[in-house]
Each structure stands twice: as C-alpha cells, then as structure tokens.
Amino acid sequence: MKGSADKIIFIFYGLFGAGLGLLIFMFALGGWSFVFTGHATKPWNGVVALIICCALGGGWGLVSYKFSEREFGSGGSSFFRDPATAILFSKRLMVIATCLAGLYFIWQLARGI
C-alpha cells in the first residue's frame, strides 16, 4: 500500500509543479491570451513557452518530492549544520526571490504607464 501512495504523491507533486508553471506562463509571461484564444501575441507566450514553463514546473515539483527530507542549503558547509540556520537561510532566499519577482512586476507596471 505504501508504494501505491508514494506513486500518487509523486504524480501529485509533478502535476502541482506543472500547474504552477502554467500560472507563471499565464501571468508572468502574459500567456493568458494564448491559453484562452490560441493566438500568441509575442514569441515568448506561445506553445513553446507553455511547454517549457510546464516542464520546468513539473520538474521542480518532482525534485522537491525527491528531496523532501532535506533542508534547503543543507550541503557540506558547516554554516548549514544547525537546522535553525538552514531554515533562516532558506527563508531569506524566499524573501529575496519574492522581492525580485515583485520588483519585476512593478517595473512592468511602470513601463506600461
């Protein structure tokens, strides 16, 4: 029974990642018009970009399942031997990545005004 449940969760992680890739394609790359109408307005929001985003998202979902027991940054460095330090480092990276994504969208908004 455990093997069957692991396969289902493995598939769920892949599909969830692919769904996130679809959301990134639709909103970050502006591919929502391609998804709903089938016509790409720019080269980066066509079928190739959709496949790339979904494949990357699904791949990252599968990687996150494979290494679900590891903390981010838990390599051979002595800096990450303490679990609290590794968690703090991963939270800082998430904040930086979120701020960069927000900065990109603010830049796009400012460019459109």
Image (tube, rainbow, N blue to C red):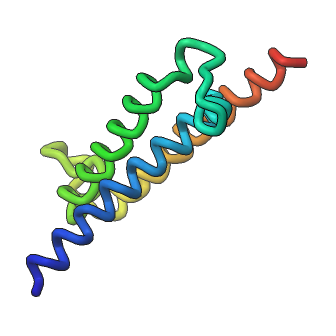
Q: Nearer the viewer, residue 92 or 40?
A: 40
Whether 68 is drawn above or below 89: the answer is below
* In this view, 85 is above or below 9: above
The answer to whether residue 56 is above or below residue 62 is: above
Across and down, in percent, residue 2 comes to 11, 83
Q: Nearer the viewer, residue 32 or 94?
A: 32
Q: Quadrant of the N terminus?
A: bottom left
Q: Image height check: is 4 above or below 70?
A: below
| Residue nearer the viewer, 103 or 6 | 6
Q: Quadrant of residue 57?
A: top left
Quarter of the image with the C terminus in it:
top right
Residue at the extreme bottom: 1
* Percent position of residue 78, x then y: 19, 47
Residue positioned 40% across, 57% down in the render = 16
- In the rendered structure, the answer to whether residue 78 lies left or right of residue 42 reads left
Query: What residue do we see at 52% from left, 22% from top?
Result: 46
Residue closer to the observer: 7 or 65:
7
- The answer to which quarter of the image holds residue 49 is top left
Task: Determine whether, in the image, residue 30 is placed left or right of residue 107.
Answer: left
Estimate the x, y position of residue 74 in percent, counting from the top left.
22, 51
> How many marks are shown on the rendered structure?
0
Residue 70 percent across, percent down from the top left: 22, 59
* Quarter occupied by residue 87: bottom left
Q: Residue furthest right?
A: 113
> Residue at left 32%, top 52%?
61
